[in-house]
Amino acid sequence: MLEAAKRAARAALETWRRADSARHMRHSAPHVTRTALTNGLARLGIAQGDTLFVHSSLKSLGYVEGGAATVVDALQDAVGPQGTLLLPTYYLPGGTVRATCDMKDYVFDPRRHGTHMGRLPETFLASGNIQRSIHPTHSVSAWGRHAADLTEAHHRAPSIFGMDSPWQRFIGCEHAKVLGLGISMGPVTFYHALEDAMGDAFPVTVWEDETTLLACLDHAGRRWEVPVRPFDPAVAQRRIDHPGRGDLRDYFAREFDAAGLRVNGQVGDAASWAIPAQAFFEHLRQLASEHVTIYASAAQLAARPIGRA
């Protein structure tokens, strides 16, 4: 009873916070239209038929007329009917992978569980013709030409980001690009695809030893046991998305710029970027072979100058 009341209070507070933020932006920020967003995406090189994995900060775009639904529309306009969009719609009721693995009787159900990833993924998930992967912590949702193929096998993958996960299938798509809308090079889960692909050959041990089987229901109500291996919390403290790792975020931004792989531009009010997925993946592999990963120390970064071939 107490926990339910706490959840309701948190939900009410979040609703008020969002409404207050929207009121402030409506009166103080320039208004951004669907057309302006689509034009900004085009300047990043986003084209009809592209497959995009989108990481985003909705508030960074400015005051968007029509809100998150307009951003979804603009993304769909940018890739067209032959394109595909993927957004992270992760659901972590424990707050972290480890805490979620420790929850007793937790069963992920896509028919009733939403996402903790913010307004844009929430809106995308609630829009029409969406395919959602079955996964207890890292469910991904997709729209468009390749949506079903990209999401249909996640619950049978050997690990979160492993073979047959949406990330590994995404890398194999033609015209696949990772899109960062108003975010740095930090909060990008695409990085983890290399860790699972390389396995023990990856130069950093990022996972705990124990794998937990978590229960999921699919869209037809059938039950699956899905393997989840939590991140090692000590290693995660030095990862690129940690608040204290601005040096690592800056290094990766300058490195991918120097390699000619990152296209930078403005979408709405947000500094944004796009990188072709296959080239992104292969450059991460090359960096890992030189002991530069999203966990690299300052000394490791200093030992490998930016842009070294």
Image: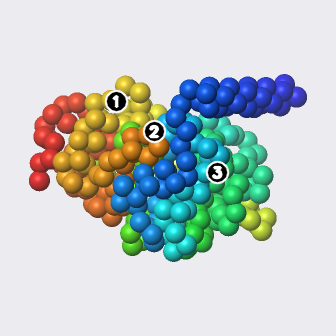
Mark 3 neighbour density, 10 Å: few (under 14) some (14–19) many (20 or more):
some
Residue topped by disc 1: 245
The answer to which of 7 and 82 lies nearer the viewer is: 82
Q: Is residue 225 above or below residue 57?
A: below
The answer to which of 111 and 37 lies nearer the viewer is: 37
Amino acid type at mark 1 = Arg
In 3D space, how far apart are the residues under numbered discs 2 and 1 (Cα atoms)?
A: 25 Å
Q: Is residue 255 left or right of residue 105?
A: left
- Confirm or deny contact between disc 1 and disc 3 (CB under 8 A): no
Residue topped by disc 3: 69
Sequence order check: which comes first, mark 1 or mark 3?
3
In the rendered image, residue 148, in percent from the top left (x then y), is placed at 60, 72
The answer to which of 305 and 220 lies nearer the viewer is: 305
In 3D space, how far apart are the residues under numbered discs 2 and 3 (Cα atoms)?
A: 17 Å
Which numbered tag is attached to residue 269? 2
Amino acid type at mark 2 = Asp
Residue visible at 13% across and 37% down? 303
Sequence order check: which comes first, mark 2 or mark 3?
3
Q: How many marks?
A: 3
Residue visible at 81% across and 30% down? 8
Query: Farthest right residue?
Result: 1
Which numbered tag is attached to residue 140? none
In 3D space, how far apart are the residues under numbered discs 1 and 3 (Cα atoms)?
A: 33 Å
In the rendered image, residue 3, in percent from the top left (x then y), is placed at 80, 28
Q: Nearest to the eye among marks 1 and 3: give it.
A: 3
